[in-house]
Image (spheres, rainbow, N blue to C red):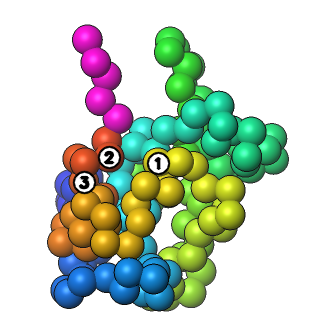
Amino acid sequence: MANSEDQRRLAPVAGAPDVGGADCVGCGRCCHHPPQTVHLLDGDEARMGPEVLRRLTVLQDKPPFMRFMGNGGSRCSALDVSVPGQYPCLIYSVRGDDCRVVEPGSPACLEARVLGHLGASMEYQRRL
């Protein structure tokens, strides 16, 4: 049985990304990550609205009651995988700030392309 790392990995992508984002939908590596990676803040929630929040996000059931994009263990719930080899975001115009920082060519983008998934650079880490 494959471990959780293998389940969220796509084959790495060679070369530099198009800085204008032209190859983002054909890549999708930044949208493959473990659960509770893409956390949402108040501004993200307001931008998304109640319907998107209900359908695509999860709220922790214990303090600090943070909200995250839903994830079944391998990819973001807003990722449309209905067309093989294409990875458009269903909520791109209202996506969270965690997603907005993964601009083409950013450190997180480059890491995702090399690993085949978004790695530790974006994981939520509780500070003690």
Q: Nearer the viewer, residue 53 or 47?
A: 47
Which circle marks residue 119 in the picture? 3
User: What residue does disc 2 label?
Assistant: 122
Q: Nearer the viewer, residue 103 or 45?
A: 103
Looking at the rendered structure, the kind of residue marked 3 is Gly
CA gap, disc 2 and disc 3 = 7 Å
Looking at the rendered structure, the kind of residue marked 1 is Asp
Q: Residue at x 55, y 66 (%)?
A: 79
Magenta-highlighted stretch: main secondary structure? loop
Residue 64, percent across and down?
50, 15
The reply to whether residue 116 is visible in this rendering is no
Is 94 situated left or right of 74 in this image?
Answer: right
Q: Quadrant of the C terminus?
A: top left
Crowd around label 3: few <14 · some 14–19 · many ≥20 (10 Å) = many
CA gap, disc 2 and disc 1 = 8 Å
Is label 1 in a helix, a strand or a loop? helix
Q: Residue at x 68, y 56 (%)?
A: 94
State which tag comes first along the sequence, 1 or 3. Answer: 1
